[in-house]
Amino acid sequence: MKSGKLSTGVSEYDVGPRSPLRTVEVLRELARHEGAGVSLAALAAKLQCPKTSLFRLLRSLEAGKYVISASGEHQLGPAALELGFAITNTREFPRCASTTLQALAQKCRETVILGVLASTKKEILYAAVIDGTHPLRFSATVGSKHPLYGSACGLAVLAHSAPADQSAYIKSVKFKRLATKTIMSTMELKRRLEEIRTDGIVISADGMVEGVHSFAAPIRQADGTVHAALSISAPNAHAVKNFRKFEQLARDAAAEISAILGYTK
């Protein structure tokens, strides 16, 4: 990044509209190193900013206890950790996903569902539902539970669950036909789960409700574990016309919520 000069002789990196953003970028980059120190040179290269301007910013953050500097390396200070804790507490799941879900519903105009793994680990619970706005639409109920093998959200969670949990589920599951293309055998279920892990998304047609397509993607916690997923569910006719669009929208929204929860690839 080229450093311009204002009439005061101060770098544009230090003041103006971008200054608050740069502060956040510095804190975010330090947070990615999980407590390990980062040198000024490494930080400047990563953020593509001048060392002199970055040094001044780090000194300001150090004065506020947002950064600790020692032996030429920098890491998050107690004030930054306190801020992070406060933000986490005010953005509890699934409430923190609300804005993303609303935006997704506006883009697709179909029913959007946020499903979380039930305590039994055998069902998916619909924690949030935004109904579609088309006259012909799929309807779902908040609080309803559905078998993991039947629900697109359930399959997304099951496919990314711990191997032991997945194995226990497969051994104990009892299949019941819900629609014409419901998964009805352990062999078929294993094949589908492998496919989902490879593709990173569930695309299900007539799996739980006849005449309905669902596009579901996993939501990851900060540690990468999956206990929830979101889906776009639409009448088959709508889904066929918007297949790639709905698939990408589901992927992007799930990735956005995962990032809010602290997951980084």
Image (tube, rainbow, N blue to C red):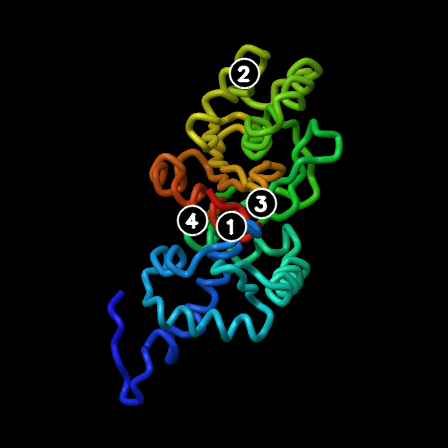
Q: Is residue 53 left or right of residue 62?
A: left
Please give the name of the residue rendered at 75% of the width and 34% of the height, measured from the top-left corner. Answer: 119
> Would you identify the image quadrant in which residue 20 lies?
bottom left
Please give the name of the residue rendered at 50% of the width and 62% of the height, measured from the top-left corner. Answer: 27
> Which residue type does callout 4 highlight?
Cys
User: Which label number is shown at residue 242?
Assistant: none
Q: Is residue 258 left or right of residue 19?
A: right
Compared to residue 105, the image places residue 59 above or below, namely: below
Classify mark 3: helix, strand or loop. Answer: loop
- Screen quadrant of the N terminus: bottom left
Which residue was labeled with disc 4? 108
Between discs 4 and 3, the one toward the N terminus: 4
Please give the name of the residue rendered at 55% of the width and 41% of the height, measured from the top-left corner. Answer: 220
Relative image position of residue 264 (x, y in whole percent) = 49, 46
Q: Is residue 3 left or right of residue 85?
A: left
Relative image position of residue 23 (x, y in whole percent) = 46, 69
Query: Which of pointers 2 and 1 indicates the residue nearer the eye?
Result: 1
From mark 4 to mark 3, how far is it between C-alphas?
27 Å
Which residue was labeled with disc 2? 190
Classify mark 4: helix, strand or loop. Answer: helix
- Residue neighbourhood size for the residue with mark 1, other residues' Cα within 10 Å, grouped as few (<14), some (14–19), many (≥20): few
From mark 4 to mark 1, how far is it between C-alphas?
37 Å
Query: Which of pointers 3 and 2 indicates the residue nearer the eye?
Result: 3
Which residue was labeled with disc 3? 222
> Would you identify the image quadrant in which residue 186 lies?
top right
- Residue neighbourhood size for the residue with mark 3, other residues' Cα within 10 Å, grouped as few (<14), some (14–19), many (≥20): some
From mark 1 to mark 3, how far is it between C-alphas?
14 Å
From mark 4 to mark 2, how far is it between C-alphas?
30 Å
The answer to whether any part of residue 101 appears in the image is: no
Relative image position of residue 37 (x, y in whole percent) = 51, 54
> Which residue type does callout 2 highlight?
Lys
Which residue was labeled with disc 1? 33
